[in-house]
Amino acid sequence: MRLRIVIVLILTTLIIGGCGLSNGDGSDHSPGNDNQNEARAKPNVAAFNDPFTEEFLTPTKPVREGYYPLKAKTGAFTLDFPEDMVIDETGYSVDPNGGSEVIIFYHPDNERDLVWSITLEYYAFMGDEEISKKSMSGRFGEELQFEPLKSKTEGQKAEYAEAKSGKVNGVTGLVWNDNAQQIQFYAAWDCKDELSDETCLKLKDIEKEKFKSVIRSIKFDKN
């Protein structure tokens, strides 16, 4: 299974290419490390059992079943983070000036029939979402058909697309606002070898809805 996770991470790396961001040194203060949070009993889930992932999580109370609040180290946005996923420390990057941030998270569970690797790219100044969508299509090697997703936050827009014939099996999403803030999502998936194609596709469709819910949960901090 670990090999499967590595393969998915490699596929995601092929999608995102070089991001040109400086690596974070981990010195930023995280709300997940404050005394009040440490005094609470941590949930026994993958996200809180991984020290690096825990740095991004705020209260230990879920925002909804299976999801906990994540705050970016740039402070630029929050989202609902899946409890069964962890952040890849080796793939994390942040601009010291807060202009961009890259977070990769994946399923570490060795028993899962299907694993995802999801890459999130935040940009503080991105003017044209149509140009971004063309770039995202190029990374997947096909012309993606984006569909609108209803955002939970007023003043934000979100869209979603699925790769069906390109070089990578995956889905992608885009969230932006009128303040030139933008987040791009890239997700690659992989099933156990022994699963049939039909079963794998059914599992992917179920997980895809969870992926969409994470996109919808994004909330930018305009300050």
Image: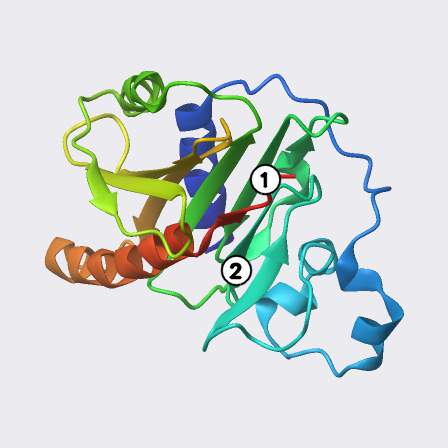
Q: Looking at the image, how many numbered discs can be counted on the residues?
A: 2
Q: Residue at the spot x=27%, y=59% of the render? A: 209
Q: Residue at the spot x=70%, y=61% of the render? A: 54
In this rendering, position of residue 141 left or right of residue 35: left
Location of residue 147 in the rendering, given as x and y in whole percent from the top left corner: 19, 40
In this rendering, position of residue 102 left or right of residue 55: left
In this rendering, position of residue 152 left or right of residue 44: left
Q: Is residue 211 above or below residue 34?
A: above
- Are there few (<14), some (14-19), or many (20+) residues within 10 Å of tag 2? many
Location of residue 68 in the rendering, given as x and y in whole percent from the top left corner: 56, 67
Question: Furthest-bottom residue in view?
Answer: 41
Q: Residue at the spot x=23%, y=38% of the render? A: 161
Q: Which residue is mark 2?
A: 81
Tell me the amino acid under the disc marked 1: Lys
Which circle's residue, 2 or 1, is located before the other in the chain? 2
State the CA–CA distance, disc 2 to disc 1: 20 Å
Q: Are marks 2 and 1 in contact (CB under 8 Å)?
A: no
Secondary structure beneath dot 1 equals loop
Location of residue 168 in the rendering, given as x and y in whole percent from the top left corner: 28, 32
Q: Residue at the spot x=47%, y=51% of the render? A: 218
Q: Residue 222 — which label?
A: 1
Tell me the amino acid under the disc marked 2: Phe
Q: Is residue 139 above or below residue 186?
A: above
Location of residue 50 in the rendering, given as x and y in whole percent from the top left corner: 68, 61
Indicate the quadrant where residue 1 lies.
bottom left
The front one of 191 and 166 is 166
